[in-house]
Amino acid sequence: MGMSNLERMKSGKLYICADEEIAREQLKCLDRLYDYNQTRPTQKELRAKLLGELLAEVGENCYVEPPLHANWGCHTHFGNNVYANFNLTLVDDTDIYVGDSVMFGPNVVLATAGHPVDPELRRRVAQFNLPIHIGDNVWIGAGAVILPGVRIGNNSVIGAGSVVTKDIPPDVVAFGNPCRVHRAITERDREYYYKDLKVDL
């Protein structure tokens, strides 16, 4: 017997995303997301509880500024100390893994889903999904877009507005469209926090 569309979602294979079973499951997740986004800033405990119910895993001391946007939510895994500014978008039709101490600027998009270039396949609403892996202590700048199947190594910085189409190694500063490594993180970064502004902590 062949795989169901729900099984194909996480396999990397093409599937038809206009599926009633998928729509029913997704709706449950979207109701939780709606509740999260309606919370007041003073309702920190409720936010933490709802985030734990929405995502697949949430470590300690995680904070996501509403509004949060997600295709599912329940396919996203957060480590500890994850911070996301407003308008984080999780196109999590398959798994997104986020390590510890990761920071997301405003308007970041993590997109596991893609569609074939062939117009006939797109007319049939064919889709594929590839997981995204973000290592520990990564900073992703405002407006960055991370595409399907990308891995970002520990400690790396992704500059604002970048479109990340390929893996980024650990311990580098990368930016651009397409995103490319521009330099390693060095001892100078311990001394200067921005351009010629010196660390004084």
Image (cartoon, rainbow, N blue to C red):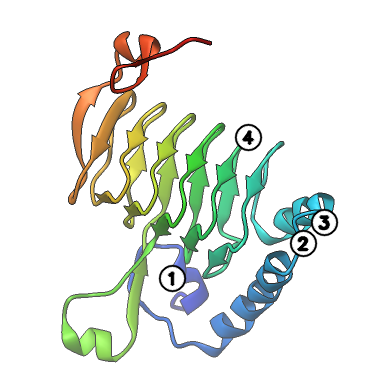
Displayed quadrant of residue 143: bottom left
Q: Amino acid at mark 3?
A: Leu
Is residue 130 positioned above or below 195 on the image?
Answer: below
Of the numbered discs 1 and 4, the one sitting upstream in the chain is 1
**Tag of residue 46:** 3
How many other residues sit within 10 Å of disc 1, few (<14), some (14-19) or many (≥20)? some
Q: Check contact, mark 2 vs mark 3: CB within 8 A.
A: no
List x then y, in percent, for residue 125. 34, 86
For the residues labelled 2 and 4, the Cα–Cα distance comes to 21 Å
Q: Amino acid at mark 4?
A: Asn
Q: Is residue 152 left or right of residue 62?
A: left
**Tag of residue 40:** 2
Of the numbered discs 2 and 3, the one sitting upstream in the chain is 2
Report helix, strand or loop for mark 1: helix
Nearest to the eye among marks 1 and 2: give it: 2
Nearest to the eye among marks 1 and 4: give it: 4
| Viewer-nearest residue: 9 or 2 | 9
How many other residues sit within 10 Å of disc 2, few (<14), some (14-19) or many (≥20)? few
